[in-house]
Image (cartoon, rainbow, N blue to C red):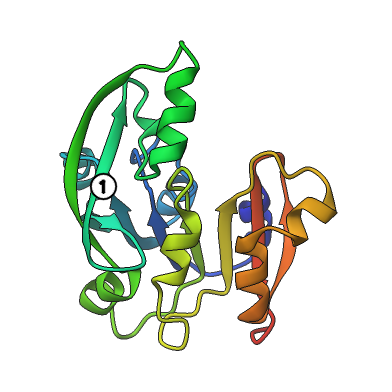
Amino acid sequence: MLLRKIFENSKPGFYVDVGAHHPQKFSNTYYFYKRNWIGINIDAAPGSMKQFNILRKRDINVEAAVSNEAGELTFYMFEEPALNTLDKDLAKQRLAEKKNKLTGEIKVQTETLADILTEHMPSNREIDFLSVDVEGFDLEVLTSNDWQKFRPKFVVVECFGKGKFEEIISDNTYIFLSALNYSLYAKTINTCIFKDNLKK
């Protein structure tokens, strides 16, 4: 809802959605797609882009695991795909909750966000907002970007369990984005939105 308010008077823009999960369900970008925005959707789950290619045909849809360096990691897949993660510790934590069931573990090749955007980003576009929802791997995604080349106006990240301002400002994601001259613009229960201080 906050993103809708931020861009309610804007022309159709461009988004990048890392951890896109589903073209409609739990999507931070589907509302904008319906209003003639376009963007890049990225998700690591095998076969995840099949539905995107059907339901989000205007978008650039990329099946890829994003990390701060190219290599190989284990991708943990759960019965509820929204819980899928590259974070081993988070996977263990979720398995400890009996309601969460692991359906598989696979080795995936990782790419940096900078490499993906270099390959797929249209040359005549700038990023209005970057949404990162990769279940415990947000900082790795953010540090893998080339912030001089690809600088979104807004960055949307998860911030579970950080209700107090003191907890937010001591978080590594907050510290990283602050160093890049982004400020905390808004917060919901599970989401923090950062704004680029260098852009109006």
Camera-nearest residue between 189 and 35: 189
Give the number of callouts. 1
Residue 149 in the image: state x and y as whole percent.
41, 87
| Lateral position of residue 87 relative to residue 178, left or right | left
Residue 168 in the image: state x and y as whole percent.
74, 55
Q: Quadrant of the C terminus?
A: bottom right
Secondary element type, mark 1: loop
Q: Can residue 24 be seen in the rendering of this structure?
A: yes
Residue at figure coordinates x 23%, y 72% from the top left: 120
Q: Quadrant of residue 111?
A: bottom left
Camera-nearest residue between 37 and 109: 109
Residue at figure coordinates x 50%, y 16% from the top left: 97
Residue at figure coordinates x 36%, y 67% from the top left: 68
- For label 1, the crowd category at 10 Å Cα-Cα, with few meaning under 14, some 14 to 19 and many 20 or more, is many
> Which residue, given by chain and number where applicable, does mark 1 sit on?
44
Which residue type does callout 1 highlight? Ala
| Lateral position of residue 199 relative to residue 150, left or right | right
Residue at figure coordinates x 83%, y 47% from the top left: 164
Q: Can residue 25 be seen in the rendering of this structure?
A: no
Residue 4 vertical placement versus 7 (above, below): above
Residue 140 in the image: state x and y as whole percent.
43, 61
Q: Quadrant of the N terminus?
A: top right
Residue 127 in the image: state x and y as whole percent.
45, 73
Residue 53 vertical placement versus 154 (above, below): above
Q: Quadrant of residue 101?
A: top left
Residue 82 vertical placement versus 97 (above, below): below
